[in-house]
Amino acid sequence: MNSVLKGYLQLMRPANLPTAAADILAGITIILYLRNIDVLTFLSDHGGVVLLLVLSSVALYAGGVVFNDVFDAKLDAIERPERAIPSGRVLKRNAIVFGTILMFVGVALAFKCTLLSGIISVILSTAILTYDGYFKQFGIAGPLNMGICRGLNLLLGMSILGSLTHWYISLVPVVYIFAITLISRGEVHGDNKKHIVWAGILYAIVIFSIALIVMQQKDNLLVLLPFLLLFGFLIYSPLIKAYKENSPKNIKKAVMGGVLSLVVMNACWVAGFSNWYLALAFLLLLPLSMLLSKLFAVT
């Protein structure tokens, strides 16, 4: 693969992009159930709008991680010289142009869906850039800002009908990403057992919140349970290993496990608010993310 092309792909974190698409599809599933609309019928009748919203989210996510590397260029030259900008595969000014185009495309596609989707995409873009450029450096505000970005992405999916209900569901991914971001604080130097303990507690809150929300809306716990168990196994296994051997390598694996398991968390929403076979189909995004993670860095 051409080194420049690989550099641009590396900037976009391809392994993470299916998780952005998963947020949108999960959000759509949730809002359709709450409005008593059949998911398969809606996808058949409005597949084009669904695709636009998925592409909007993917573009916004890609633009966000490009700007993450732009703002981190000086630090990465020391700590992560293999990244696209410090390695010289992509010039910093070209990365800025690339990220800007991706962000504008993401917002434009969202406005093509509904006005509400467009407004949420603007708020999401602002949250992404404030994290990349400022709040990332702070111990609590940084993880919270990152979590808000993921919560807004779920809301972006829920906005497909042009109005919102049950917005509080988006708080669950906020807590989850807060936990992952806490773990990531030890990726370079290790020694973050305290953060790992807090992340484990937050993970438990996320799992119980999903179960509680689904049970409040739909008596579907038996369908949900296998997906929740899979989710718990995938996030806790690397986390426990990172606690026992608190090395940067294991911490990075715990972060990667948490990020890729976003697909499984979203499959839990689909299982809870729709049915098991759609949730199984949803899980096909996971091997895609895992395959891409072998080729490109997740963090």
Image: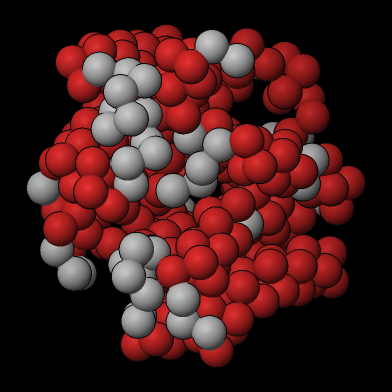
Q: How is the image coloured?
A: secondary structure
Horizontally, residue 225 falls left or right of residue 13, namely: right
Task: Check the image and name the residue furthest to the right.
Answer: 277
Front residue of 147/102: it is: 102
Dividing the picture into quadrants, the one containing residue 81 is top left
Q: Does residue 13 lie above or below 217 as drawn?
A: above
Q: What's the residue at 22%, 31% (across, down)?
A: 70
Q: Position of residue 158 (x, y in %)?
A: 50, 38
Is residue 172 in view from this perspective? no
Q: What's the residue at 14%, 53% (across, down)?
A: 135
Front residue of 137/280: it is: 137
Q: Position of residue 217 (x, y in %)?
A: 63, 63
Dividing the picture into quadrants, the one containing residue 45 is top right
Horizontally, residue 228 falls left or right of residue 209, namely: right
Q: Position of residue 49 (x, y in %)?
A: 57, 15
Quadrant of the drawing holding the N terminus: top right
Dividing the picture into quadrants, the one containing residue 46 is top right
Front residue of 97/208: it is: 97
Q: Does residue 236 lie above or below 43 as drawn?
A: below
Horizontally, residue 241 falls left or right of residue 43, namely: left
Q: Position of residue 7 (x, y in %)?
A: 43, 22
Is residue 275 in view from this perspective? yes
Q: What's the residue at 51%, 42% (across, down)?
A: 297
